[in-house]
Image: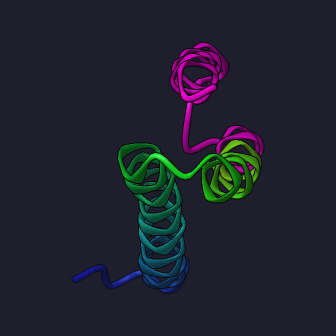
Amino acid sequence: MPNIKSAKKRVELSKAAYEKNKADRSELKTNIKKFDAAVIGGDRAVAESAYKLAVKSVDQAVTKGLLHKNNAARKKSSMTLRLNRLA
């Protein structure tokens, strides 16, 4: 444990950021899994609504710095292809 006051503050801030990032990553994964489940289910309407939510989550993850923009583009492209195959 640090002895210097500013170092103690940084430890607390780091813990808070870690927890927030963990929650955000978990939400992102959940939204992607919901889309995957909708695609497997075969219902186009449910898949489209889940797709919109998943793409929004991926874009927010890029803004928050959780994903690299190219990683996000790959995820979105993959989801779009899977959605289009349902038609």
Residue at image location 55% in from the left, 44% down from the top: 66
Residue 71 or residue 2, whichever sits in front: 71
Q: Which quarter of the picture shows residue 69?
A: top right
- Which residues lie in the magenta part? 58-87
Asked if the stretch drawn in magenta spans residue 68, the answer is yes
Q: Quadrant of the N terminus?
A: bottom left
Q: Main secondary structure of the magenta part?
A: helix
Is residue 44 depicted above or below 50 in this figure? above
Residue at (53, 60) in percent of width and height: 31
State how the image is colored: rainbow
Q: Is residue 3 left or right of residue 80?
A: left
On the image, the x and y values in percent for residue 65 come to: 64, 42
Residue reaching furthest to the left: 1
Q: Is residue 16 above or below residue 21?
A: below
Q: In the visual, does 67 lie left or right of 69? A: left
> Quarter of the image holding residue 3?
bottom left
Residue at x 61%, y 50% (from the top left corner): 47
User: In the rendered image, which quarter contains the C terminus?
Assistant: top right
Between 26 and 30, which is closer to the camera in this rendering?
Answer: 30
